[in-house]
């Protein structure tokens, strides 16, 4: 089959977006695009000098965010903290955690083999797969900005952002569209910074209290009407139930917004009783070795992302200094 390319003109990119052939060629230079409805065999192959051209996947335009369980308390893992009012969590039920490992295994197998050499010009707002520099693994992401030779992405299953080389980005295919976005954006309810903005000490304390992927917390949703879920977070330890917002207030980096705030475990500050929990959702067993292993794997992946971001920032500074000279 060497020296042959697929001779199709119905393009999956065009079927999905209704855009022009010229635009498709710009997005995937050197690659013929094939309809997923098309069937082909040797009779459909034409001799050509365009050796190395490949088949473009069916692109994913958007994905829904994971639905939160309808219950009083939701086990969660905090995966990204930019401030107490801007963070990302994953639902940490046993069932949900067991889904993530197979997803990343399939992602890496696909992008290391099937799409290992696809030339791709991403656009802002679309979904993609991005590769970590330190361990060369892949994750689902959203394109935030496109720069010369670099792309700003947000990892949609974790919530954190980084800049990666253009060569480390691929289109996200419909093979990985079955699972909703795992990281939902949220904020602590009924608190605000003591100053005009959150200082670094407040952010660091919030990161330490939540464990950044290493702790299982219980979240109580107070408002899920908009794009950002308002919730309370409690760290249930053997000795006590730690109210995360309460710890921020005790440290002097946050204040309460309203007087009707539920205090951990007993009652609201105005004396009204806490509403009884109607039901719970598949609690995570603390001594379950499989769940603990999944949490540790999640935390390790987040740590690699943070380390890679620092390395890339150093590389970009060196490049900028070289260009300035």
Image (tube, rainbow, N blue to C red):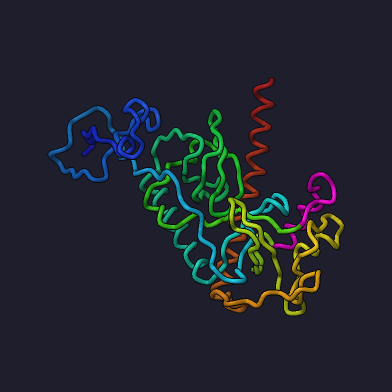
- For the residue pair 282 and 257, the one nearer the viewer reads as 257
Residue at the extreme top: 325
Residues 250 and 204: in front is: 250
Tell me the residue at 40%/45% (across/down): 60
Q: Which residues are magenta?
A: 191-210
Would residue 158 be found to the left or right of residue 21 on screen?
right
Q: Nearer the viewer, residue 116 or 294?
A: 294
The image position of residue 34, as x and y in percent, is 27, 39
143 relative to 80 in the view: left or right? left
Quadrant of image for the N terminus: top left
Measured along the vertical axis of the image, is residue 165 above or below residue 289?
above
Q: In the rendered image of this protein, does residue 314 appear above or below residue 138?
A: above
Q: Quadrant of residue 324?
A: top right
Q: Give me the residue at 34% from left, 30% from top.
A: 30
| Picture layout, residue 323 above or below residue 220 | above
Residue at image coords 66%, 38%? 313
> What is the quadrant of residue 119 in the picture?
top left
Residue 81 percent coordinates (x, y): 68, 53
Quadrant in which the C terminus appears = top right
Residue at image point 75% right, 72% down = 264
Q: Looking at the image, is 30 positioned above or below residue 230?
A: above
What is the residue that sits farthest to the left in this orientation? 43
Foreground pick, 272 / 291? 272
Number of numbered markers: 0
For the question of whether residue 3 can be seen, the reply is: no
* Residue 23 covered by magenta stretch: no
- Decide whether residue 202 is among the magenta residues: yes
Asked if one can make out residue 111 in the rendered structure from this viewpoint, the answer is yes
Whole-percent x and y of residue 233? 69, 65
Q: Position of residue 134 (x, y in %)?
A: 57, 48
């Amino acid at each position: 089959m060497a020296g042959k390319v697929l001779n199709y003109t119905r393009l999956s990119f065009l079927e999905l977006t209704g855009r022009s052939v010229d635009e498709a060629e710009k997005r995937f230079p050197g690659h013929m695009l094939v309809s997923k409805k098309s069937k082909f065999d040797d009779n459909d192959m034409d001799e050509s000098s365009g050796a190395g051209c490949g088949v473009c996947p069916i692109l994913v335009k958007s994905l829904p965010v994971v639905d939160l369980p309808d219950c009083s308390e939701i086990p969660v893992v905090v995966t990204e903290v930019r401030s107490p009012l801007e963070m990302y969590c994953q639902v940490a039920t046993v069932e949900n955690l067991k889904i993530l490992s197979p997803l990343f295994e399939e992602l890496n197998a696909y992008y290391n083999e099937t799409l290992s050499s696809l030339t791709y010009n991403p656009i802002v707002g679309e979904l993609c797969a991005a590769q970590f520099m330190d361990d060369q693994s892949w994750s689902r992401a959203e394109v935030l900005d496109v720069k010369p030779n670099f792309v700003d992405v947000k990892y949609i299953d974790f919530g954190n952002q980084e800049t990666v080389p253009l060569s480390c980005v691929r289109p996200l295919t419909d093979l990985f569209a079955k699972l909703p976005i795992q990281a939902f954006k949220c904020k602590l309810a009924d608190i605000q910074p003591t100053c005009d903005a959150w200082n670094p000490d407040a952010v660091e304390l919030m990161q330490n209290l939540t464990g950044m992927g290493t702790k299982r917390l219980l979240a109580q949703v107070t408002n899920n009407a908009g794009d950002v879920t308002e919730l309370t977070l409690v760290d249930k330890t053997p000795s006590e139930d730690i109210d995360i917002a309460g710890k921020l207030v005790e440290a002097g980096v946050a204040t309460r917004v309203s007087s009707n705030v539920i205090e951990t475990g007993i009652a609201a500050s105005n004396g009204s009783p806490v509403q009884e929990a109607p039901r719970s959702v598949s609690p995570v067993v603390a001594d379950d070795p499989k769940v603990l292993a999944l949490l540790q794997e999640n935390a390790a992946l987040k740590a690699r992302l943070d380390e890679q971001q620092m390395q890339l920032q150093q590389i970009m500074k060196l490049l900028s200094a070289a260009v300035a000279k």
